Amino acid sequence: MEKLKAILNKYFFFWLALLLIPACWALFIPGYFGASDDIHIAWLYELHKTIMMGKIPPRFVPDLSFGFGYPLFNFVFPLPFYIAEIFHLLGLSLVDSIKALFFITIPISLYFMYSLLREFTNKALSLAGAVLYIYTPYRAVDLYVRGAIGEIVSFVFLPAILLSLIKIKKSDNLGWVGIGGLSLAFLVLSHNITAYLFFPFLMLFILLQLIFLNNKWQFLYRIILMIILALLISIYFWLPALLDSKLMKHDTVFNFADHFPTILQLITPYWGYGASVPGPYDGIPFFLGSTNLLVLGLGLLFLVTHWRKYSLNQKIILSWAVISIFCVVFLMNHRSTFVWNSLPFLTYFQFPWRFLILTTFAIPILVISLDNFSQRGLLAVILIFLTIITNGSFFRPQDFLGRTDTYFINRYIPTPVAKKEYLETQEEYLRLPKNTKIRPDRNFPLVYSEEGTIENITKINELDTLIDVDSKMGMKLNFSKYFFPGWVAQIDGQSVTIVIGDPYGQILIDIPAGMHKIKIAFEETNFRKILNAISLISFLVSLGLVKNLWLRLKIYGRTF
């Protein structure tokens, strides 16, 4: 047995790589598969174009809605696209950049989950819990059924946040405050719905820590500092998204009441690649996982029978996991409708089954309850084996379609002319600006007017344009972009007020008689510039705290 342990320890990373192969092998098949959220590839294309214009951070993209553009990244979580953009700038295609992003989330989330569990139990059970975290069926749904880029990335930061809280309690170094602030900020920037979903449970974990902690005030001070840092790092995104939401129409394609999974769906080993539909006949699976249910059952059993044997820290995190699991199972049940109707912004979740994010995270934590099992090593090996055998087959797409960048550009990018594929699809679920009475249904000239003469149009980039006009009586100039704060216009170098045109909410400028040079551009407002500066400074402060911790650990020959 000792010889076997030595071999396993010596080739640990080799065995770990083998364990991950079933989860990610499909990502190495050329081309993209049939994930439902494949529009994200087109959104990466739009982000790339906007960054190449020097519009940093990107907010308004140029091509959506028949070229009327859209304030996409003012509202849509940007971090996954930033990371994918790095891969794209390194030479990967749009498709391969998204798949590379998917891939790196697997080992990184395993590392953070392993590190979190290692605070409470031995290496073997920690690895078993981390492997279960990777191979939970809902992770396969996100990867290969939905292609839900935001949720996929958010799984990296959930364990990192709790790990930071635990380290903050144990360590005097503020470096873990910096890591916690970055992790929480990155969760907000990765998927704002997941962040909103997770935040009450994060508060519950902090409260449980405070109840049983002697030095409450020092811990509370550092947690408050961590949260403030996180909010300031991400403030350039979440505050404009919140304030500017009033400028958009409040509508959604999906009604949350149609998408409650049943208890039977959570425990029945069904798998499929369909959609979420009203009633219990969904094509998309909501199965918690066979080994997950086994760990849940064993965890509850051991908690009842071995409660006195656990340390205080183990009791805290296990209690948190159990409370979280039962809370989210209730919130996924139709009997919680009154809660959905009462809490603000909860209806934006659209799908109650999104709370599977929390069961995916919390159930593997229950391996800590098996810490008192006499044969922990053997049990861990059995759990890893069962996890991969029972859940590993889910980690593949329904079809390897081999789709390349061209397919997604034709399907979702309607400029310079909308292709047949776009006309059959469109992005109908994007919320329209409030002043848009009807959605454009065709491509329009970038600049048009029923009066006067447009002498020349010079595109500085896909958003900023110079226009020469000549009008004897004055004219109304239409610019075919949705108006949104940040658009500015000048006539002969003098700023003028933009009018919102009918019926598309396009940019409209009143131009006096004569020959004039018009400039129309999208810029950051002064308010957003201030928020950008706050975010950058807070990010650098957090990095400084992390660097200080890293240097200190390096001196003592330790790692995070």
Image: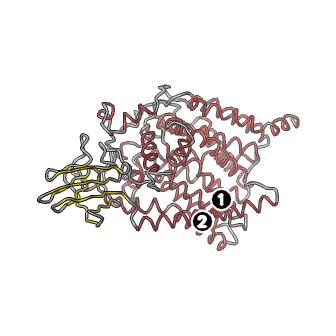
* Along the viewing direction, whichever of 313 and 135 lies nearer the viewer: 135
The quadrant in which the C terminus is found is: bottom right
* Along the viewing direction, whichever of 282 and 486 lies nearer the viewer: 486
Q: Which residue is mark 2?
A: 226
- Name the spot of residue 103 as percent of width and height, x first: 59, 38
- Name the spot of residue 2 as percent of width and height, x first: 88, 37
The quadrant in which the N terminus is found is: top right
Q: Which residue is mark 1?
A: 164
Identify the amino acid type marked 2.
Met
Q: Does 501 sit above or below residue 530?
A: above
Q: Earlier in the sequence, mark 1 or mark 2?
A: 1
Q: Secondary structure at mark 1?
A: helix
Q: In the picture provided, is 266 more to the left or to the right than 351?
A: right
Q: Which residue is the extreme one toward the left?
A: 473
Q: Residue at x 46, y 68 (%)?
A: 530
Q: Secondary structure at mark 2?
A: helix
